[in-house]
Image (spheres, rainbow, N blue to C red):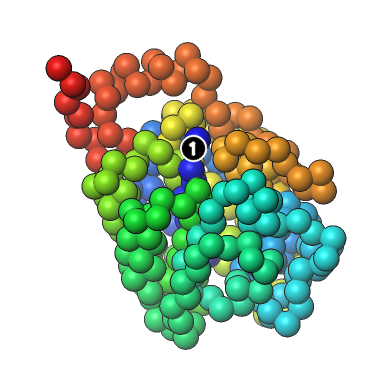
Amino acid sequence: MTKVVCVVIDGLRQEALQCAHAHCLDNMISKGTYANTLYHYGPDLTLPAFATLFTSMPVSEHGILTNSSAVGLSPHTSSITSLSRYHNKTTSIFFSKEQIRSLFPQDSLHTSLFINSGGIKNVDNQLADQAARHIQKEKPDVCWLYLQGTDIAGTHFGYLSEPYLESVERADQSIGLLMEQMAVVGLQNEYVLMVLASHSGSWNHQSTFMPSNEPLPWIVCGPGIAEGCCIERKLSLMDLTPTLAQILGFESHPCWQGRIVQELFSSQDEEVNRQEKRGHVHLFTQRKIPTAA
């Protein structure tokens, strides 16, 4: 059964993918599916976006409107982490924003690691290294990796500033490190890698509660994922939750309001053709694998 590594680059903007030297993300786009029309339809803040992503519900129903962890999720929500646990899937998360902890129902996680950034220190590489070691050893069904450095740089120096673009490149390097470590132990063909932004950094202090009109980047590659596909129709963060469930092999929860992004999945014939075309090439390392005699 396919597993998933989901990397959330906080504050990643569409324009950054064109301005920064993000070789790893560029490679993922060329070898997987990319959408530049993903929207949150809620406050352009980290916690509300995460709540929508985990529950497949709009902010009006899950109840998270700010970045404060004082207000918990509505009891009417059902998190993908809880449903994954119900289906005997192991879930891990590596993060640096403490408020995110409040979004996980009790006992829904098997492993979590928090490294305090203090809102000023970029700890993306440390988190990626720890996540890679964990994946190598434990092979979780779902691993969430939250990279905050881009949002820190955007907040302090301005989005699309030079320090911001450097932080995007550092996040790209962190993902590359993760991929390399997975390839070392031959896990690159067992995991779908999903990269997205939680918000675009377009909010201001006067309009914190206004929904963002900025699209978020979404990149997916790995086994069973359509190659070289660009999704142009509008998508919601709520759609990613049932899509993740589909990848993991279980049904969506009845209360989820998102829809599965069917364009993401390649047909069996396309998958066979892709493997033949690549000549058994590693998805991440691009090294030819010798076939057994």
Position of 210 compared to 116: left or right? right
- Kindly identify the residue that appears in the image at 31 percent across and 49 percent down: 182
**Which amino acid type corresponds to the residue marked 1 in the rendered image?**
Thr
- Kindly identify the residue that appears in the image at 73 percent across and 51 percent down: 56
- Can you tell which quarter of the image residue 259 is in? top right
The total of numbered circles placed on residues is 1
Which structural element holds mark 1?
Answer: loop
Q: Nearer the viewer, residue 26 or 50?
A: 50
Image quadrant holding the C terminus, namely top left
Q: Position of residue 49 (x, y in %)?
A: 66, 62
Q: 111 above or below 207?
A: above
- Kindly identify the residue that appears in the image at 75 percent across and 74 percent down: 72
Position of 218 compared to 103: left or right? left
Q: Position of residue 230 (x, y in %)?
A: 52, 33
Q: 258 above or below 156?
A: above
Residue identifier under label 1: 2
Q: Position of residue 82 (x, y in %)?
A: 68, 56
Visible in this render: residue 265?
yes
Q: Nearer the viewer, residue 246 or 18?
A: 246
Position of 175 compared to 71: left or right? left
Mark 1 crowd level (few <14, some 14–19, many ≥20, 10 Å Cα): some
Q: 154 above or below 18?
A: below
- Kindly identify the residue that appears in the image at 67 percent across and 51 percent down: 86
Q: Position of residue 232 (x, y in %)?
A: 60, 35
Visible in this render: residue 196?
no
- Can you tell which quarter of the image residue 137 is in? bottom left
